[in-house]
Amino acid sequence: MDTLDYIIVGQGIAGSCLAFELLERGAKIEIFDESWRDAACLVAAGVINPITGKRLVKSWRSGLAHPYAKKFYRALESKLGAEFFHDRKILQLCRSPEERELWTTRAELPDYAEFIGESHPAGFFDALNDSNGSFFIEHSAWVETQSAMEAFKKYFESRGVLVRERFDYAKLDASGEMLSYGGLSARKIVFCEGWRAQKNPYFSWLPYRPAKGEILSIRSDAEVPPHIIHRGNWIMKCGDGLFRIGSTWDRERLDSEPTDAARAELLAAAPNMFGKKYAFDVVSHSAGVRPCTATTRPHLGAHPADSRLLSFNGFGSKGYALSPYFAKHFCDWLDGKTALDSEADLARHARKFFPKA
């Protein structure tokens, strides 16, 4: 059997983007994925948002990653014959006069001017709770996550590179010049396992802080603008009378089981976004675990004791926004064309655990 260039473990959004990039560069790969129910990529919002958090700061590397992601997804739709990418503005409803003032201040800064669009006075949107006014966030988008992941899956299956089974660490033999796994020979292996990487025997020392998130799909006759509406939580229309609303954060219960508490939290959040009372019917309720890290930066790079063992993981809640750009960046690094982004290079953590490496 020919030697593979890479074994990839995990076909979430990070693993999918990396595998696609490697195939485009002519690499020989094999992907192992068990289709975990709690994979964040399947239940994520898929929102690309350049400004995030209570402090309204620019999302990390958004200036590089977000334009690249939009270009990548458009090209991917064409290549895979699928539709899942939508340019869509975010309508930010201010929750207080203080928050509106913060948005106004941010809009005057040169680094933020291109991202903060038209502002609106209180009461501009009759169907929304915009009593403190609102702003548009530009250069945002939405990826239909399940459609995108299904398109990736079909593509990898058509290329004959996807193996639907759990990767068994015990079967990986790194004692020879080449890595050996279940009859396969490979030059390198890349772990893209999401939050489960904290149980990976080679990379369990990396600082992960996974967080469970839950999302509702609801049906309503609410007449709202066709934007991603954000007011603490987010809600967006994704079909005729169908909406998605999210999401929650839970660092204690890490599983894929929807909870009554999250359902109640999200149903309580919906009326806070609307200026009128609307009836809601819950269509579905899903949960997944985000591969967040302690530093909020991904873990990219090689194991300090064996450079054939690689990590491409830890994109947290921003997998759909960051993975396309960093897949290209990671492959450029593998090809010797660039150094890894210093804030994402796992070497910054390795020094603590492998001081002599």
Image (cartoon, rainbow, N blue to C red):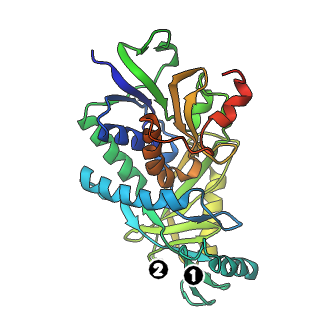
Q: Nearer the viewer, residue 61 or 243?
A: 61
Residue type, label 2: Pro
Q: x, y (%) of residue 234?
A: 57, 66
Q: CA distance from mark 1 to mark 2?
A: 9 Å
Q: Compared with residue 236, is residue 68 higher up or lower down, i.e. above or below?
A: above
Q: Which picture quadrant has residue 162?
A: top left
The disc placed on residue 225 is: 2
Q: Against 48, is 116 above or below?
A: below
Residue contact at pointers 1 and 2, CB within 8 angstroms: yes
Q: Nearer the viewer, residue 350 or 49?
A: 350
Residue 119 on image: x %, y %: 58, 85
Q: Is residue 8 left or right of residue 300?
A: left
| Quarter of the rendering containing residue 238 | bottom left
Res. 264 visible in picture: yes
Can you say which quadrant of the picture contains the C terminus?
top right
Give SS at disc 2.
loop
Q: Amino acid at mark 1?
A: Leu
Q: Which mark is residue 128?
A: 1
- Residue 341 spot, x, y in % from top left: 57, 45
- Residue at 47% x, 13% y is 171
